[in-house]
Image (cartoon, rainbow, N blue to C red):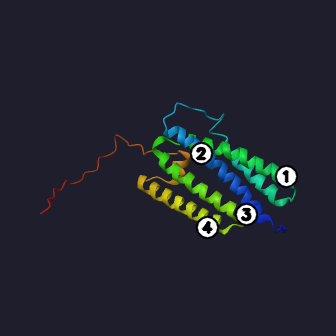
Amino acid sequence: MIDLHPSTLHQVASYFGTFIGGMTFTGSIAAFIKLAGMKFNFDLPAKGLINKPLVLSNIIGICAMILTQSPTIGLIALVNAAITSFMLGWNITNSIGSADMPVAITVLNSYSGWALCAEGFMLNNPMLTIVGSLIGSSGAILSYIMCKAMNRSLYNVIFGTWVAPKKIDPNAPKEKKEHVETNPD
């Protein structure tokens, strides 16, 4: 059984606040550059392969921070969260296509709310917690509504995956449907 210290909630809140805030910061910069039409293209090396190792390093970081009460390990974990979240925010947002950018902006808005909520927990400030949860949840709801309107899933928008269309067999028999005219009367 893991014996958690009473300050564990503050550690988790500070870690998630740092991680989500970093993703929001660099993701917003990438979205601004893309939407402003600036000719700036900076892709991270091996951009298609680094997302999973960055997420894994954050999972290890938060586990190390929670399971040890060492301030040194906690500081290293927070620095790791800041650096890797900057990279993830830039890499994910920079990879999103221009047509999906409005949804990405609502997701980033939602992230900023959840980071504010986590900081409210950390600082024991109910106002930050309430406002952050309202911003985070409203951004998430708006993102969901926009994805439904575009007939896409949020995962497909954020990670840029499309479902491959079905291949049509040219030799397959054609389906015959009857054309029916209607009028308003």
**Residue drawn at (56%, 64%) of the image:** 134
Looking at the image, is mark 2 or mark 1 earlier in the sequence? Answer: 2
Whole-percent x, y for residue 182 in the image: 16, 58
In terms of secondary structure, where does tag 2 sit? helix
Q: Residue at x 67, y 42 (%)?
A: 87
- Give the x, y percent position of residue 148: 44, 57
* Residue with the mark numbered 4: 130
Quadrant position of the N terminus in the picture: bottom right
Helix, strand or loop at disc 1? Answer: helix
Q: Which residue is mark 2?
A: 27
C-alpha span from label 4 to label 1: 30 Å
Residue highlighted by disc 1: 73
Instruction: Specify whether residue 134 is in view.
Output: yes
**Labels 4 & 1 near each other (Cβ < 8 A):** no
Which of label 4 and label 2 is nearer to you?
4
Say which label, 3 or 4, has the lower sequence index.
3
Identity, as a three-letter code, of the amino acid under mark 3: Leu
Left or right for 172, reference 58:
left
Q: Give the alpha-carbon distance from disc 3 to disc 4, as whole Å.
A: 13 Å
Callouts 3 and 4 close, C-beta under 8 Å: no
Crowding at mark 2 (Cα within 10 Å: few <14, some 14-19, many 20+): many
For residue 180, what is the image quadrant? Answer: bottom left
Residue 156 in view in this figure = no
Question: Dot 3 surroundings within 10 Å: few (below 14), some, or many (20 or more)?
Answer: some
- Determine whether 88 is above or below 145 in the image: above
Q: Which residue is mark 3?
A: 123
Q: Earlier in the sequence, mark 3 or mark 1?
A: 1
Q: Earlier in the sequence, mark 4 or mark 1?
A: 1
Nearest the eye: 135 or 19: 135
Q: Amino acid at mark 1?
A: Ile
Q: CA distance from mark 4 to mark 2?
A: 24 Å
